[in-house]
Image (cartoon, helix red, strand yellow):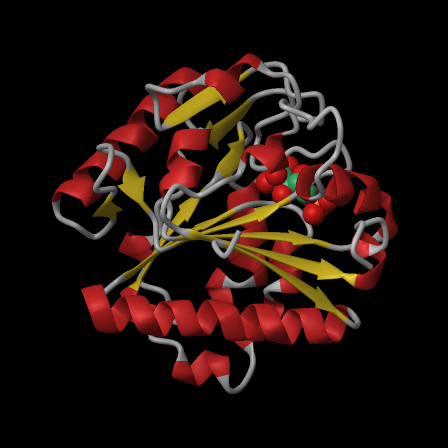
Amino acid sequence: NDRRELRILENLDELRTDLADYIAELSEAAVKERGVFAIALSGGSLIGLMGKLCEAPYNKTVDWAKWYIFWADERVVAKNHSDSNYKLAKDGILSKVPIVPSHVHSINDSVSAEEAADEYMFVIRQLVKTRMVSVSDISDCPKFDLILLGMGPDGHIASLFPNHAVLKETDEWVTFITDSPKPPPERITFTLPVINSASNVAIVVTGESKAEAVHLAIDNVEPNCPSLPARLVQPTKGKLVWFLDKPAASKLDDL
Ligand code: 6PG
């Protein structure tokens, strides 16, 4: 499978550097090709692991003004709440680099989850029309330049949890759930068709507590875990890169 790459880094510092290099290279390539870079973030430890982007040389070399920023998932809480994925990214990255505020497409926190999901999908649709976000050539799905995901110990990515009905969603790009097993319960999330239409998807996973889920998501296991969300990340035409530290990779078959 040459559309999937495993990067197993010696330690967290090397992972941080490799991840920053990867994001900076994809940004440069997208800006060269399309004039803009459409990137979707997640919450969790990912944001801290992206921190090197705010340091030299990336803080100066990345063309921040060309970034259009989205979220692969968001918790339905106020934007200044400590659970907000927007707040996490703003405090950790966006406030430290010269992003254009109007390019930050965070999810509305003053309406219901359902309305916020609809509104977010509408915004993405407008940006697809103007090609700030590309479009897939096999469906009408948005084709983000990069979707960054973390993974929970249960194998969830974005707010797509094991065995949840939204794993089967094929029509909507964005949906909401009210029964997240990881609090808070209400969340808005990209669906699998959007994730799998991206040009690039990265799943960034560290720590021993996730080693079993990494094994189940990547190796040829029996039964092959059809409802493990991370295993369902299979970009149709794009490329998937797993960033793993040694503990997270410790249960992979080929090690
Ligand atoms: C969320 C996140 C989620 C996260 C994983 C992994 O809203 O909960 O976006 O998808 O990426 O739960 O989180 P950690 O890396 O903190 O374990």
> Which quadrant does the C terminus fall into?
bottom right
Q: Where is residue 142 drawn, in percent x and y?
A: 28, 40
Q: Where is residue 205 drawn, in percent x and y?
A: 70, 52
Q: Where is residue 133 drawn, in percent x and y?
A: 25, 49
When asked about the image quadrant of residue 121, the answer is: top left
Q: Count every numbered label the image shows and give the total.
A: 0
Q: Is residue 118 left or right of residue 233?
A: left
| Residue 22 visible in rendering | yes
Q: Quadrant of ligand 1?
A: top right
| Whether residue 164 is situated above or below residue 208 in the rendered picture | above
| Whether residue 90 is situated above or below residue 34 in the rendered picture | above
Q: Where is residue 29 drawn, in percent x and y?
A: 32, 71
Q: Residue at x 71, y 59 (%)?
A: 244
Q: Is residue 135 left or right of residue 198?
A: left
Q: Residue at x 16, y 50 (%)?
A: 131
View extreme (left): residue? 130
Q: Residue at x 75, y 28 (%)?
A: 222
| Whether residue 181 is situated above or below residue 15 in the rendered picture | above
| Residue 35 visible in rendering | no
Nearer to the camera, 74 or 207: 207
Q: Is residue 197 left or right of residue 77?
A: left
| Whether residue 42 is situated above or below residue 51 in the rendered picture | above
When asked about the image quadrant of residue 125, the answer is: top left
Q: Is residue 2 left or right of residue 157?
A: left
